[in-house]
């Protein structure tokens, strides 16, 4: 990159969301290391910056916070510990195994690190990625776009719309409904392919809920005028609206990892990691929602602290594993993480996601036909909520054996 300023740091963290900031705070507090965090947005904090609801901070700071307050505390903790948190700075590519090309308001930079932590988070898939046909009118948003418009830029009903349809029934869909109502927009329907929606909706009445249905077309030119809806039983119709919000369906923001040749897991679609957050590229770690789509901010921050411990061992000279026993998902399981077994796996729980709701499913872990673990879940496994599987069975994995298979089913 001609004209770029060449610099070196000890650890370069890409992404200043909960995982990246928590990692930076612990790393900076641990020793005389140069820790630098890059964030392409104008402010650090990630998604919580525009989540004006509670549910944050109890595990990290011992008190309930809303999203913006939580984001500010995470950023402040990293900077007080000594990390350099730089905003409006984007990592645009790799020029070496541990060297990133960067654009900043001050110009081009080429930064080489002893370790790189990818904490680029996740995003909701927009209409185009969900292959919903129709025109390209205004008024089509994801939850993140909606919350940024309302909470960061003050957009109200006059510009946002008057009648909205929300696609999805996960908790994030409920937050979208509350954001729309707070902006003065009437929510005329929630549409979900699931067989049932949320049982609770706080103290306010839920909007009309259409289950077992999907949006098949967007209508209108210039501005959205409605959405075509098809029921799974074959019935179809049109809901008149001028705003539609696509919620959930998270995908890891893995472009930088992919460009750097970091191996991805086909199930999670994020970087494949072992129990110490080490990827298949020596010196490159990954943590937080870039690994598999969205978990809570507290969970991502916990992984940030976990990856910091692993990075410190790496800086102290711990060897990088040449390989590991791969972990694969089977049956009704969509993915399992982490994706490889290493010596640290026995201490860290695995996360599982199912393809469809399953009541009291059976979980079975095996290697080369040998059963390592079998248990039955007590409740229902939901596609939008991870199941935690203890890792005690990982001690019985044969390092020279074949892949470990995690299967879930009725």
Image (tube, grey):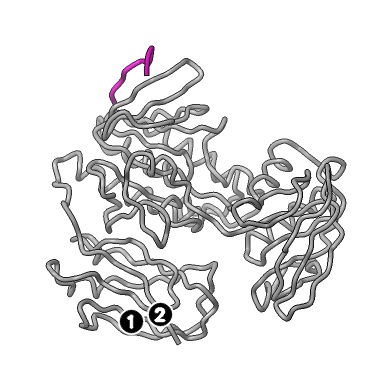
Magenta region includes residue 200:
no
Residue 260: image tag: none
Location of the N terminus by quadrant is top left
Residue sitting nearer the eye, 75 or 167: 167
Residue sitting nearer the eye, 145 or 221: 221
In the image, what residue occupies the spot 29% across and 78% down? 365
Q: Is residue 238 above or below residue 374?
A: above
Circle 2 residues within 10 Å: few <14, some 14–19, many ≥20:
many
Evaluate if marks 1 and 2 touch, with contact meaning CB atoms under 8 Å apart.
Answer: yes
Residue 364: image tag: 1
In this view, which residue lies farthest toward the front? 134
What's the distance in space between the residues labelled 1 and 2, CA to CA? 6 Å
Classify residue 391 as left or right of residue 304.
left
Classify residue 274 as left or right of residue 377.
left
Quarter occupied by residue 222: top right
Element type where label 2 sits in the image: strand
Q: Is residue 130 above or below residue 223?
A: below
Residue 202 drawn at (x, y percent): 72, 67
Location of the C terminus by quadrant is bottom left
Quarter occupied by residue 291: bottom left
Circle 1 residues within 10 Å: few <14, some 14–19, many ≥20:
some
Q: How many marks?
A: 2
Residue 408: image tag: 2
Residue 13 drawn at (x, y percent): 37, 37
Report the magenta residues as a range.
1-8
């Amino acid at each position: 990159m001609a004209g770029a300023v060449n610099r070196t740091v000890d650890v370069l963290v890409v992404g200043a969301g909960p995982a990246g900031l928590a990692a930076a705070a612990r790393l900076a507090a641990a020793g005389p290391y140069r820790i630098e965090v890059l964030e392409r947005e104008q402010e650090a904090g990630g998604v919580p910056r525009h989540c004006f609801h509670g549910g944050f901070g109890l595990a990290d700071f011992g008190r309930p916070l809303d999203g913006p307050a939580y984001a500010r505390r995470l950023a402040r903790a990293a900077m007080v510990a000594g990390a350099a948190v730089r905003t409006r700075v984007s990592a645009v590519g790799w020029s070496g195994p541990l060297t990133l090309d960067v654009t900043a308001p001050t110009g081009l930079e080429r930064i080489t690190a002893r370790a790189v932590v990818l904490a680029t988070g996740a995003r909701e898939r927009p209409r185009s990625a969900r292959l919903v046909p129709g025109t390209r009118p205004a008024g089509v948003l994801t939850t993140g776009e909606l919350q940024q418009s309302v909470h960061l830029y003050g957009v109200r009903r006059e510009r946002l719309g008057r009648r909205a349809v929300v696609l999805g029934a996960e908790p994030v869909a409920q937050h979208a409904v509350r954001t729309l109502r707070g902006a003065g927009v009437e929510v005329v329907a929630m549409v979900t392919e699931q067989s049932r929606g949320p049982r609770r909706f706080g103290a306010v009445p839920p909007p009309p809920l259409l289950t077992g249905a999907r949006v098949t077309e967007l209508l209108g030119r210039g501005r959205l005028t409605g959405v075509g809806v098809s029921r799974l039983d074959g019935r179809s119709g049109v809901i008149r609206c001028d705003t539609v919000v696509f919620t959930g369906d998270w995908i890891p923001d893995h472009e930088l990892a992919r460009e750097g040749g970091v191996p991805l897991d086909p199930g999670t679609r994020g970087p494949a990691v072992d129990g110490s957050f080490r990827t298949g590229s020596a010196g490159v770690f990954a943590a937080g929602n870039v690994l598999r789509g969205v978990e809570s901010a507290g969970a991502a921050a916990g992984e940030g602290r976990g990856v910091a411990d692993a990075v410190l061992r790496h800086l102290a000279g711990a060897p990088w594993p040449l390989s590991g026993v791969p972990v694969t998902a089977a049956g009704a399981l969509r993915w399992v993480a982490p994706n490889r077994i290493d010596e640290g796996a026995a201490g860290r729980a695995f996360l599982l996601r199912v393809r469809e709701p399953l009541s009291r499913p059976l979980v079975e872990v095996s290697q080369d036909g040998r059963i390592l673990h079998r248990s039955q879940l007590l409740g229902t496994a939901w596609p939008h909520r991870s199941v935690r599987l203890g890792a005690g069975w990982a001690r019985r994995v044969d390092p020279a054996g074949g892949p470990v298979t995690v299967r879930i089913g009725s």
